[in-house]
C-alpha cells in the first residue's frame, strides 16, 4: 500500500532519474549540491546551470512544476540580492542620480542568484523523482538516527495540515471583513498576532494528540515496517548516472580550485 501526502512533491514517471537507485542518487546529488555551493567564480555559472537543465530534462518533470515552486524562494533571493549591485564594490558601470551600478556588486548578485537557482532546482529534481519516504529510508540506511527520521517525516506530513488550517483561518478572517475595510495598523497587527497564536496552539495540541495516538499503537515498542513503492531501480542506469554525476562534481571542484589558485 502506497503512502501519499497531500501536496506530495514526487511526480511518478519512468525517466532515467526516476529509475536511478535512491541511495546512490541521494549521495550523488547531495555531493553535487555541495560542489555548486563551493563555486566562487561567475565563469562557472553557465556550466552549472547547463548541468542542472540537463538533469531536469532527463527527469522529465513539467516546467510548471518548477515555476510554481520557485515563486516564493525566488522572491526571497531577489529581495536579498537586489541591493548588491548598488552598494557593493568600487568600479562604477552606470549611474542614475543617487544610484550607481557597480561591477563587483553585479558579479556578486549574479553569482548568488545562479548558485541559489542551481541548488534549489537540483533539490526539486531529487524530491520530484523520489518519494519522500524513500529518501528517509535511504538516509536511515546511511546512518540517520531513527528519531530524527521520524521527526522529519512528521514535520513534512503535518506542514500541509498546518497550511490548510492557516488557509481556513484566513478565509474566516476575510469573512469577518479583515482587509476589506480601513483598519488601524495596531488593529491589523492584533488580528495577525491572534491568527498565528491560535495556529501555534492548535499545532501544539495536534502534535500532542498525534504522539499519544502513536504511543497507543506501539510507537517505540516495536520495529517499524517500511513499504517500498518507488519506481524500480535500473541496474544499468544507476552506475552510469552515479559515475557521470561524480565526474561532474569532481570537475566543478577542480575547476573552482584551479580558478582560485594564483
Image: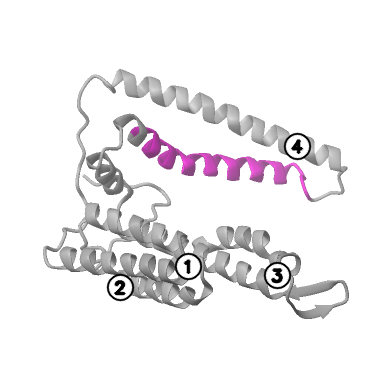
Disc 4 is placed on an element classified as helix
Name the N-terminal-most of marks 1 and 3: 3
Q: Mark 3 points at which residue?
A: 85
Where residue 221 appears, as percent x and y from the top left, is: 24, 19
Estimate the spatial distance between the alpha carbons at disc 3 and disc 4, rounded to whole Å: 38 Å
Drawn side of residue 152 relative to residue 236, left or right: right
Q: What stretch is highlighted in magenta?
A: 150-179
Estimate the spatial distance between the alpha carbons at disc 4 and disc 2, rounded to whole Å: 47 Å
Where residue 126 appears, as percent x and y from the top left, is: 34, 58
Name the N-terminal-most of marks 2 and 1: 2
Disc 1 is placed on an element classified as helix
Give yes or no for contact between labels 4 and 2 (Cβ–Cβ under 8 Å).
no
- Bin the neighbour count of mark 3 within 10 Å (Cα to Cα): few under 14, some 14-19, many 20 and up: many
Residue at (18% x, 68% y) in the render: 240
Name the N-terminal-most of marks 3 and 4: 3
Q: Which of marks 2 and 1 is in front?
A: 1
Estimate the spatial distance between the alpha carbons at disc 2 and disc 3, rounded to whole Å: 35 Å
Give yes or no for contact between labels 2 and 1 (Cβ–Cβ under 8 Å).
no
Q: Mark 1 points at which residue?
A: 260
Q: Mark 4 points at which residue?
A: 191
Q: Name the residue under label 2.
A: 58
Residue at (37% x, 73% y) in the render: 51
Name the N-terminal-most of marks 2 and 3: 2
Where residue 157 appears, as percent x and y from the top left, is: 41, 41
Residue at (81% x, 79% y) in the render: 95
Amino acid at each position: 500500500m502506497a503512502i501519499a501526502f497531500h501536496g506530495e512533491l514526487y511526480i511518478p514517471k519512468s525517466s532515467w532519474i526516476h529509475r536511478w537507485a535512491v541511495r546512490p542518487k541521494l549521495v550523488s546529488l547531495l555531493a553535487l549540491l555541495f560542489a555548486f555551493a563551493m563555486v566562487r567564480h561567475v565563469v562557472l555559472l553557465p556550466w552549472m546551470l547547463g548541468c542542472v537543465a540537463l538533469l531536469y530534462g532527463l527527469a522529465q518533470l513539467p516546467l510548471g512544476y518548477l515555476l510554481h515552486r520557485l515563486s516564493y524562494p525566488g522572491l526571497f533571493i531577489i529581495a536579498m540580492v537586489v541591493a548588491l549591485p548598488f552598494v557593493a564594490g568600487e568600479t562604477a558601470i552606470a549611474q542614475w542620480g543617487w544610484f550607481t551600478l557597480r561591477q563587483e556588486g553585479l558579479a556578486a548578485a549574479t553569482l548568488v542568484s545562479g548558485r541559489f537557482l542551481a541548488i534549489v532546482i537540483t533539490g526539486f529534481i531529487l524530491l520530484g523523482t523520489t518519494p519522500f519516504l524513500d529518501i528517509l529510508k535511504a538516509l536511515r540506511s546511511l546512518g540517520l538516527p531513527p528519531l530524527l527520521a521520524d521527526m522529519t517525516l512528521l514535520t513534512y506530513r503535518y506542514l500541509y495540515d498546518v497550511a490548510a488550517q492557516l488557509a481556513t483561518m484566513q478565509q474566516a478572517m476575510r469573512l469577518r471583513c479583515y482587509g476589506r475595510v480601513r483598519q488601524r495598523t495596531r488593529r491589523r497587527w492584533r488580528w495577525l498576532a491572534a491568527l498565528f497564536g491560535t495556529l501555534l496552539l492548535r499545532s501544539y495540541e495536534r502534535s500532542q494528540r498525534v504522539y499519544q495516538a502513536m504511543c497507543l499503537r506501539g510507537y517505540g515498542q516495536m520495529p517499524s515496517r517500511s513499504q517500498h513503492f518507488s519506481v524500480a531501480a535500473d541496474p544499468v542506469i544507476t552506475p552510469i548516472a552515479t559515475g557521470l554525476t561524480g565526474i561532474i562534481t569532481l570537475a566543478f571542484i577542480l575547476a573552482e580550485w584551479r580558478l582560485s589558485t594564483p
